[in-house]
């Protein structure tokens, strides 16, 4: 087989019958595409997360279930032979109803993963039938048989070696015969319990699967024609980037550019698989190629925004010229499995942000037990309602003068926790949620629109 390609379609790309049909056309147009990774239909995961968080009112549960049913039924009615697929979807909906009831009594991360996985399990039944009705020899594959993870429900870590082995044994041979349609976002632990890779995880799944089957290309089909200089929903003059390096795109994803799940490029980088990002609504508009080597490395590449940040500030006079204070802080955080994202320090204080949470969403919380232990050491202040603004570029730590341009543009904005210098690829800082969009718009105008 030549140039084996994996294509991933996000939620809006499989939102309804017309969108799914556009995906089918994209798959048909490229005979190298043998493996398709699909998200849940748009909106479904959010509804499932609400159920998984525990809805005590039975009438609200029924309402949510009806919404989920309606999204799928609207597509099913447009198929020529929907009966068998409708029965599969209905059986998954029955599972959703049972799990939602259990979650209303006692929600848990394990139950959440089992429940939210149902979105991808349903969408892939429908997409497979739609493809078959167009005359494509397509088959549906349950990715939980390949995508092995640990049992960190909500943000499971993949077992890369196991995935490669299972993909070679189970998936690759099937792709010789069929166009295989499978689920993003979900996996299973060693005991066969369903896990998820965190919100937006289908991109990461697609990259892990592409790595596992040793694909030569990965396409991420979404609702925008590629990666832009910033989220085009925030700055309307954002420009598409035709070509970007793995490291720049990784920084963007890490700093919140929703277009890619933060871990997506790790597998692609490990196997040097070029990644294409395009719009399933307008494939003719082209998109962005993410590659190892790119022609240009501009000082400013893009701006990213990540909201829902939790900042913890620890203060203690004992920190002044003392040793071991930070070690103690991090020992407590590690003991309570609190993952730290950014950090800045002064003589008597240290501010840090907490890493994003998994599938159940919201701002990350400092566990009460961790807070109590920290309070024995120092004062603890926790702030939320903050967003992280990141400027991504190249050779930034060697360039002079641009910080003045950045901070001058934002002279009216209260900037917090500025991180600058540790990476050659970014400059980032926190702002209040209310100033976040305006900060991006002003910076974009100053740095990218001239
Ligand atoms: P999908 O459901 O296909 O995975 P997402 O909603 O997760 O789609 O990601 C696509 C969205 O990412 C776009 O609609 C856009 O609003 C947002 N986005 C954020 N940053 C960027 C960026 N730099 N370039 C393009 N889109 C971006
Ligand atoms: N359906 C999941 C979500 O909405 C995964 C994804 O779409 O990438 O987060
Ligand atoms: Mg996404």
Image: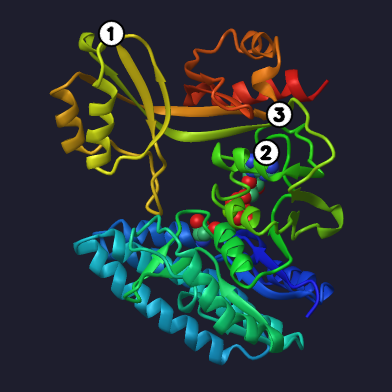
Q: Position of residue 405 (x, y in %)?
A: 69, 11
The vertical placement of 198 against 163, above or below, is above
The vertical placement of 408 against 378, above or below, is above
Q: Answer left or right for 377 relative to 208.
A: left
Q: Earlier in the sequence, mark 2 or mark 3?
A: 2
Closer to us: mark 1 or mark 3?
1
Q: Of 108 and 296, which appears nearest the observer?
A: 296
Closer to us: mark 1 or mark 2?
1
Asked if the residues shown at circle 2 and circle 3 are in contact, with their CB atoms under 8 angstroms apart, the answer is: yes
Q: Of 317 and 53, which appears nearest the observer?
A: 317
The image quarter containing residue 149 is: bottom left
Q: Residues within 10 Å of mark 2 (few under 14, many from 20)?
A: some
Q: Write down the residue under mark 1.
A: 321
For image coordinates 23% across by 13% down, the residue present is: 316
Q: Write down the residue under mark 3.
A: 394
Q: How is the image coloured?
A: rainbow
Q: Quadrant of the C terminus?
A: top right
Q: What secondary structure is found at the residue carrying circle 3? A: loop
Q: Position of residue 278 (x, y in %)?
A: 75, 55
Asked if one can make out residue 294 in the rendered structure from this viewpoint, the answer is yes
Q: Answer left or right for 167 relative to 78.
A: left
Q: CA distance from mark 1 to mark 3?
A: 35 Å
Q: Position of residue 154 (x, y in %)?
A: 37, 57
Q: Write down the residue under mark 2.
A: 248
Q: What secondary structure is found at the residue carrying circle 2? A: helix
For image coordinates 52% across by 35% down, the residue present is: 306
Q: What secondary structure is found at the residue carrying circle 1? A: loop
Q: Position of residue 111 (x, y in %)?
A: 30, 66
Asked if one can make out residue 73 in the rendered structure from this viewpoint, the answer is no
Asked if the residues shown at circle 1 and circle 3 are in contact, with their CB atoms under 8 angstroms apart, the answer is: no
Q: CA distance from mark 2 to mark 3?
A: 8 Å
């Amino acid at each position: 087989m030549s140039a084996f390609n994996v294509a991933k379609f996000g939620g809006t790309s499989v939102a309804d019958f017309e969108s799914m049909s556009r995906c089918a056309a994209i798959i048909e147009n490229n005979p190298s595409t043998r493996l398709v990774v699909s998200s849940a239909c748009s909106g479904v995961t959010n509804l499932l997360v609400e159920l998984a968080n525990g809805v005590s009112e039975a009438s609200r549960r029924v309402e949510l279930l009806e919404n989920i049913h309606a999204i799928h039924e609207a597509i099913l009615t447009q198929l020529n032979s929907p009966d068998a697929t409708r029965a599969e979807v209905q059986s998954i909906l029955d599972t959703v109803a049972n799990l939602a009831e259990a979650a209303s009594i006692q929600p848990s991360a394990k139950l959440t993963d089992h429940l939210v996985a149902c979105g991808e399990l349903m969408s892939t039944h429908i997409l497979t039938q739609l493809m078959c009705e167009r005359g494509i020899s397509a088959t549906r594959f349950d990715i939980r048989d390949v995508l092995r993870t640990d049992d960190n429900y909500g943000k499971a870590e993949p077992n890369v070696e196991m995935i490669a082995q299972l993909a070679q044994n189970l998936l690759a041979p099937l792709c010789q015969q069929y166009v295989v349609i499978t689920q993003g976002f979900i996996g299973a632990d060693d005991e066969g319990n369903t896990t998820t890779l965190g919100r937006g995880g289908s991109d990461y799944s697609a990259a892990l699967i592409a790595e596992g089957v040793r694909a030569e290309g990965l396409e991420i089909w979404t609702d925008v024609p590629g990666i832009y200089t910033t989220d085009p929903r925030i700055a309307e003059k954002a420009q598409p980037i035709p070509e970007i390096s793995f490291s720049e795109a990784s920084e963007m994803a890490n700093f919140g550019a929703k277009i890619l799940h933060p871990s997506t490029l790790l597998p692609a980088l490990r196997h040097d698989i070029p990644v294409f990002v395009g719009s399933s609504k307008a494939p003719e508009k082209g998109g962005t190629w993410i590659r190892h080597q790119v022609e240009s490395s501009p000082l400013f590449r893009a701006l990213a925004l990540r909201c829902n940040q939790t900042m913890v500030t620890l203060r203690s006079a004992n920190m002044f010229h003392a040793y071991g204070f930070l070690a103690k802080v991090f020992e407590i955080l590690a003991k309570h499995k609190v993952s730290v994202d950014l950090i800045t320090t002064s003589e008597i204080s240290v501010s840090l942000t907490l890493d994003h949470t998994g599938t159940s969403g919201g701002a990350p919380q400092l566990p009460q037990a961790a807070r109590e232990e920290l309070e024995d050491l120092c004062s603890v202040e926790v702030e939320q309602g903050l967003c992280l603004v990141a400027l991504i570029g190249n050779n930034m730590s060697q360039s002079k003068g641009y910080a003045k341009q950045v901070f001058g543009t934002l002279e009216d904005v209260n900037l917090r926790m500025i991180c600058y210098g540790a990476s050659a690829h970014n400059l980032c800082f926190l702002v209040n949620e209310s100033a976040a969009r305006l900060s991006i718009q002003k910076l974009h105008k100053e740095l990218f629109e001239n």
